[in-house]
């Protein structure tokens, strides 16, 4: 097996006295697509937020794309250049137009000239099928459109890893599909994806591996086929019965 | 339950109401007895006071600088003659009388520059260059000593140019300080955070008058002998630090209103701390507190009148100087204060309108 692109070694994290990640061991191969699920408070968001150092871990080693995550600001900024993230609440910049949202990081972090950054941005907007909204402000768009803009914004930095933190949880039901369609398309591009979601249909169709977390631990991981057909632990069975029962 | 499909309802325009002026007035001014009572009380007060003020200010007033005519009025009418007599002393303070074209030109230049700075199409690098040039010309004109201009020491500067200089410079220098202090108070570095907290709490805990006293009288005691800093500069630093402390809290309020997700999104994209503040956080935070920022600016502008107590004669000080030194005109201070009040009001009202315009313009992005 080649060198993993993300490697957790006995990573632990506490919020105050609460042990939110407990000795996590996980390695992710380049190009792998992983769906992480689990009950709320299980640490799944925290886990992926450690990867781009939005959360710091207190014990263990975490290496991303060959760089160990420490409190060295330069190392963290280097990692973040190659890791895109999509948030539950979109977190677009409301004072900038859609196009400006997309060109900001390439211009200021990647030092790309404005014209080139705009061309790249338009290409990404076309990819997420929202090019005609480029001049609008984020709050003038629907939730689904905003989330697609957020995805396009991350892609503008040509990341090697994409993190999705419950990207469809804040959306109206009729908008979930348009976002999932874009994510499915991305999955075919060979980019490494880690996605926290409860969209089990998405997990079935694109994930290489499904990880189930509970109480800060990885309880079970398997291919989607095996995971849904033969869950091994009682906790997983219980969880699946709750989210798949209707 | 009726399950049959109903025919679709076609959208139609909202009903319009045609109401006459009388009915509208009735609705807005006399809708119920409380509203009617308020209307009657306000109208009664207007009827009682407006004609009286009009008679005093216009009908029975004396506009000529005629001291005998003014005295004959016995305050039954306004003596605007005092303004006609003293306006140069009020507007330019103790500045040498024959050289007063210099502060006039300097003030006009400054006003032109302020108006230009408020105009959207002129915002560019050139504006900064123009400001440096105008401030340089301002100082050369006021101070003299070059190009055949007689030197005038800063202690003799006064009136409107002094008020404008103090407020413009203390606002311009105070604003960046305020932003840095506001950011510093939210820093995760304890040394910087506590320094900013001490600064704000210390300055906010004392009145401006005592800051001015310190700047004017105590500061020189701590300087090594032989080194003197101009009183104008010391006072300017005092006002700047004072207003920056208040403004910092206003800015901090704006910073706190920015959701955590904005910081996270910027960080996730690899933006550094300063890039994040400059491009993401401050533009949103500042526009949120535009009214409060303008509030601070207006109050700094008016606070400059306190420099009188350290013997600098700004607009307010010049008025006291102009009337206090002349027994013939001293009794007409009310007219004098109304005059400078009108000047202050003109500046403040312009600032307030400008802030409203800025707010409207910035709200475009937040229109849903």
Image (cartoon, coloured by chain):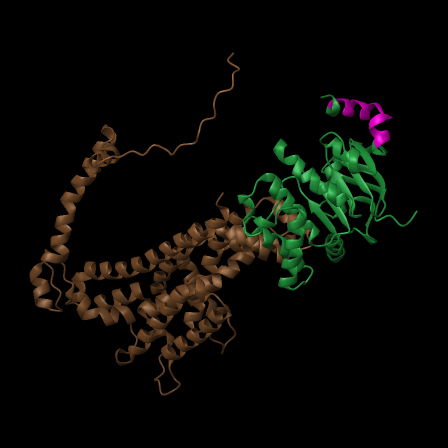
In this orientation, which residue lies closer to the viewer: A197 or B252? A197
Residue B257: image quadrant is: top right
Left or right position of B46 against A240: left
The residue positioned farthest toward the top in the image shown:
B1
Q: Which chain wears brown? A: B
Q: Read off the magenta span.
A: A225-242
Look at the image and tell me whether residue A56 can be seen.
no
| Vertical position of residue A123 compared to residue B319: above or below | above
Residue under the image location 49 percent in, 55 percent down: B245
Q: Is residue A37 covered in magenta?
A: no
Q: Position of residue A206 (x, y in %)?
A: 79, 38
| Vertical position of residue B146 compared to residue B325: above or below | below
Q: Which chain wears green? A: A
Q: Position of residue B222 (x, y in %)?
A: 50, 69
Residue A173: image quadrant is: top right
Q: Position of residue B76 (x, y in %)?
A: 10, 55
Q: Quadrant of the C terminus of chain A?
A: top right
Residue under the image location 52 percent in, 61 percent down: B176
In this orientation, which residue lies closer to the viewer: B189 or B84? B84
Residue under the image location 87 percent in, 48 percent down: A4
Count of number-bearing discs: 0
In this orientation, which residue lies closer to the viewer: B88 or B32? B32
Look at the image and tell me whether residue B163 can be seen.
yes
């Amino acid at each position: 097996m080649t060198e993993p692109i993300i490697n957790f070694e006995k990573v632990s994290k506490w919020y105050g006295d609460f042990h939110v990640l407990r000795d996590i061991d996980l390695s992710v191969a380049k190009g792998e697509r992983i769906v992480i699920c689990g009950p709320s408070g299980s640490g799944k968001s925290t886990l992926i937020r450690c990867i781009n150092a939005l959360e710091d871990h207190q014990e263990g080693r975490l290496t991303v794309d060959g760089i160990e995550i420490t409190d060295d600001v330069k190392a963290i900024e280097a990692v973040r250049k190659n890791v895109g993230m999509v948030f539950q609440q979109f977190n677009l910049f409301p004072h900038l137009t859609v196009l400006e949202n997309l060109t900001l990081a390439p211009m200021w972090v990647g030092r790309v000239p404005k014209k080139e950054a705009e061309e790249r941005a338009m290409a990404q907007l076309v990819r997420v099928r929202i090019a005609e909204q480029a001049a609008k402000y984020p709050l003038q768009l629907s939730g689904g459109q905003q989330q697609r803009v957020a995805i396009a914004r991350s892609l503008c930095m040509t990341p090697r890893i994409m993190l999705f933190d419950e990207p469809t949880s804040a959306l109206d039901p009729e908008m979930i599909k348009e976002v999932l369609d874009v994510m499915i398309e991305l999955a075919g591009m060979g980019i490494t994806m880690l996605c926290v979601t409860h969209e089990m249909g998405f997990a079935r169709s694109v994930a290489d591996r499904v990880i189930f977390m509970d109480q800060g631990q990885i309880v079970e991981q398997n291919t989607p086929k095996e995971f849904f057909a033969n869950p091994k632990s009682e906790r997983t069975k219980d969880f699946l019965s709750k989210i798949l029962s209707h | 339950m009726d399950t049959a499909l109903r025919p679709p309802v076609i959208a139609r325009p909202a009903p319009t109401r045609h109401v006459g002026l009388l009915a509208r007035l009735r609705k807005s001014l006399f809708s119920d007895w409380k509203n009617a009572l308020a209307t009657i009380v306000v109208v009664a007060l207007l009827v009682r006071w407006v004609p009286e003020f009009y008679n005093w200010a216009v009908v029975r007033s004396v506009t000529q600088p005629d001291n005998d005519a003014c005295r004959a009025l016995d305050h039954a009418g306004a003596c605007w003659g005092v303004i006609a007599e003293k306006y140069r002393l009020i507007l330019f303070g103790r500045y040498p009388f024959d050289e007063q074209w210099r502060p006039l030109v300097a003030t006009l230049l400054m006003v032109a520059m302020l108006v230009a700075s408020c105009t959207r199409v002129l915002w560019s690098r050139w504006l900064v260059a123009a400001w440096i040039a105008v401030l340089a010309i301002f100082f050369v004109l006021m101070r003299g000593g070059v190009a055949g201009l007689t030197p005038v020491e800063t202690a003799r500067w006064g009136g409107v140019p002094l008020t404008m200089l103090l407020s413009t410079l203390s606002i311009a220098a105070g604003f960046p300080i305020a932003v840095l202090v506001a950011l510093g108070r939210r820093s995760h570095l304890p040394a910087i955070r506590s320094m900013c907290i001490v600064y704000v709490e210390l300055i906010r805990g004392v009145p401006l008058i005592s800051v001015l006293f310190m700047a004017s009288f105590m500061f020189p005691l701590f300087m090594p002998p032989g080194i003197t800093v101009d009183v104008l500069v010391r006072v300017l630093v005092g006002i700047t630090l004072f207003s920056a402390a208040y403004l910092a809290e206003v800015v901090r309020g704006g910073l706190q209103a920015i959701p955590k997700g904005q910081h996270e999104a910027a960080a996730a994209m690899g933006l550094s701390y300063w890039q994040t503040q400059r491009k993401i956080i401050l533009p949103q935070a500042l526009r949120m507190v535009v009214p409060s920022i303008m509030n601070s600016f207006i109050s700094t502008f008016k606070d400059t009148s306190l420099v009188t107590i350290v013997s600098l004669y700004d607009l307010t000080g010049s008025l006291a100087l102009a009337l206090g030194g002349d027994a013939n005109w001293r009794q007409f201070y009310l007219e004098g204060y109304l005059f400078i009040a009108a000047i202050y009001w003109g500046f403040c009202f312009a600032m307030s309108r400008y802030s409203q315009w800025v707010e409207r313009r910035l709200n475009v992005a937040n229109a849903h």
